[in-house]
Amino acid sequence: MKKLAGLILFAVMALPAVDIRAQTAEKLDVDIRAYDNEKILIMPNSRYYSPVPVTFRPGRPDSSYSISIDDGANYTDYTPMDSASLTLYPDDETSPAKRWNIKFGCGNGDDEVFSDVYSISFDTESPVISLTDDDKISKWLTEETTVSLKVSDDAGIGRVISRSGDTVLAEFHETEGEEIKERTIELPLKKTENRFSTVETVCCDLAGNSTVMTFDYMYDDSPPTLSVNGVDNGLITPDPVKITMAADDEGEDAYISYTLERTEGDRVITTRAENICNTSSLDIGEDGAYTLTVNAYDPAGNRSETVTKHFRIDSAPPEISIKGAGDTADLRSFSNIIFETADESAGSTEVNITLKRTSMGKTDIIELGPYTTVAVNDIREVNINSDGDYEIMMSATDGAGNISSAYKRFRMDSNAPDISVAGISEGEVTGDKPIVRFMAGEMFYDSTIMTAVLEKKDKNGYRQVSKDEHVMKDVRDHIDIRPASEGLYRLTCLAADRSGNRNESTISFTVDYTPPVISQMSDIDGNYFRSFLLPKKIKDLVKDATKVVASAYVNDVPYHDGDRIIQEGRYVLTILASDEADNVSESSAEFIVDHTSPQVVLEGLDKNGNILPNSLIRVSLFDREDHLVSVKFGERSIPVDPDGTASFTVDESSGQKITVVAADDAGNVTDTEIHMQYSMASFLPGPLTVKEVSAGDEAEEEDAADPLSLMVGLLSVLSGSFGFVYRTFLRD
């Protein structure tokens, strides 16, 4: 049919679904055969599925054919056959869907006859079978379950059947007119006579293509049997035991897992073994209480009933102890003596205790027991509340006849040492090197140890600087402590006797023979200030290890925190300080208060105040302690000579200005411009402009010089010529 693509003409008909040829009651017979010449019967109104080519041979030679292009709805154009037969092929691309609807006809007019409509679908692909629950069959099954198979085919499923041996698990057949392309089948997996079963599934499509899929599954829901021999449950024995374990699973391999716990006192030691041979043994010989738990498993995971064995091996005598008193020790009053018995054979150990007390030459005997323990660890207590010498004898016998014994001897002493301190008192501050003496009073001096610990405080807390310790011999014994240096000390004395009675006494004191340190006086001494105010509070200028008392005086007049000195003049500041140890310090500093800005002196003018050509102008300051910062004549900088003056020659013929900046040690600053011009007439210099007068950093805001408060005066100097002296004053 590959050649038909060029022969099919598509015509648009006015009446759809109507054959353009007349219809008659008579039908044209068509012989239909498969590729192997096998005759095929295609029923009217049904579709024939084939994986191989199909050949049509009409009964009359003048036949033509029509292929419906709308899936059998219309047959319009008929094409004459160029041979006696027509073959349709599965791989013909004329119908990509591989679905064909064809009709044959022959003759004209009343002799015109037509065949039935033959519907053919080609399918060369086998169905697909997939197992969606493959995880279920990948392991042993211990109970009945189902798995899902999905079968699919693009042309339609014809028949599906699944068997396990002779048993049909599931079956599906195509019904009339049904075209199913995908279906899910549930397969029940059940217990069979054999543990291993094979499931075969055959799926055929409507064209006869088939696919076979098989899988195996393993089913076992019978647990193995287990036997444990060699020890009875609840056995107590001093001898080693041998335990045998065996598992059977109807001829199949089985394995054993066990857990062995051994309890020895408070310790529990666990041993586990997994998947060992189905016949195994254990040799156990160590003392302890045992719990053996055994299970058997088959390959399917079925577990046998758990076998548990409890038994104990005990070959050691009971453990006994007497606590609360060391051997030949002294005890304090109201002490408890504890008798402890430990034995794995709880409830079968018999204990006997004898207590002897000697006091004032008399001996008393107290019998405690015999008694039988009721637990693995049995504890009994006896309260000792009387002074004296004691002896205790204890014995214990377990059910196996093992015997243990213990012995203790001690003395009861209820007197604690007394401690006394001399030489200094708590919290005392001293300027002398003290001697602190500790003494202790005790009934039994040969049993008393006295310890004195001296600690000195530093930035990290207290640290030990000395430790003295010795055994007291009589009531006159003592310990003397002599601190070697200044500092805050803590002295602790401890006295303890052999019975453990203790007493403690602690005192804290300070050794200080260094006067207080007065700081920052060097920052004041010899310095100038526009106004004076202490940089800190008076007490903050004094440093000492103890509390201090400080006072200040200015020119012998009391000075207080916050007092400000603004009156110009020379002053002496004195600070006096004393600490808790009566150490005294005194420090003085001299300073000057000055808030007058430097005064500028100009020399070199004639007697009328005129500047003559080539005259020498000299700039200096009225106060020799002030200094010039800079001098400019016009735009030219004039160097300041080592003597603190600046000189220059006038050679310009036009008006000029002199700019002078000067400062004093108090931080007062004069910054001024003097405008001058040449003239032979008598006149005063041009206007003097005070550009800025500023103070140093030490001056407070209210003490700064105000330029508007300045006034200019003219004074004579001793040089014989006239100079301009500019002085500044604070306005009242």
Image (cartoon, grey):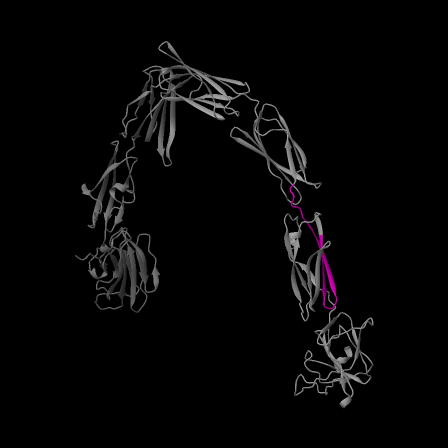
Query: What residue occupies the far top of the structure in this picture?
Result: 361
When the figure is inspected, residue 558 is found, relative to residue 88, above or below; the finding is above
* Occupied quadrant, residue 24: bottom right
Q: Which is nearer the eye, 506 or 728?
A: 506
Q: Quadrant of the N terminus?
A: bottom right
On screen, residue 396 versus residue 214, left or right, reads left
* Occupied quadrant, residue 112: bottom right
As for residue 552 lying within the magenta part, the answer is no
The spot of residue 276 in percent (x, y) is 66, 37
Q: Which is nearer the eye, 688 or 511?
A: 511
Query: What residue occupies the far front of the structure in this picture?
Result: 25
When the figure is inspected, residue 213 is found, relative to residue 429, above or below; the finding is below
User: Is residue 53 visible in this depiction of the protein?
Assistant: yes
Query: What residue occupies the far bottom of the structure in this picture?
Result: 109
The spot of residue 289 in percent (x, y) is 55, 29
Marks counted in the figure total 0
* Occupied quadrant, residue 421: top left
On screen, residue 45 versus residue 493, left or right, reads right
- Dominant secondary structure of the magenta stretch? strand
The spot of residue 552 in percent (x, y) is 22, 41
Q: Which is nearer the eye, 197 or 389?
A: 197
Q: Which is nearer the eye, 716 or 38?
A: 38
On screen, residue 267 versus residue 683, left or right, reads right
Q: Quadrant of the C terminus?
A: bottom left
When the figure is inspected, residue 342 is found, relative to residue 194, above or below; the finding is above
The stretch in magenta equals 198-223
User: Is residue 711 visible in this depiction of the protein?
Assistant: no
The spot of residue 102 in percent (x, y) is 74, 79
On screen, residue 490 versus residue 208, left or right, reads left
When the figure is inspected, residue 532 is found, relative to residue 490, above or below; the finding is below
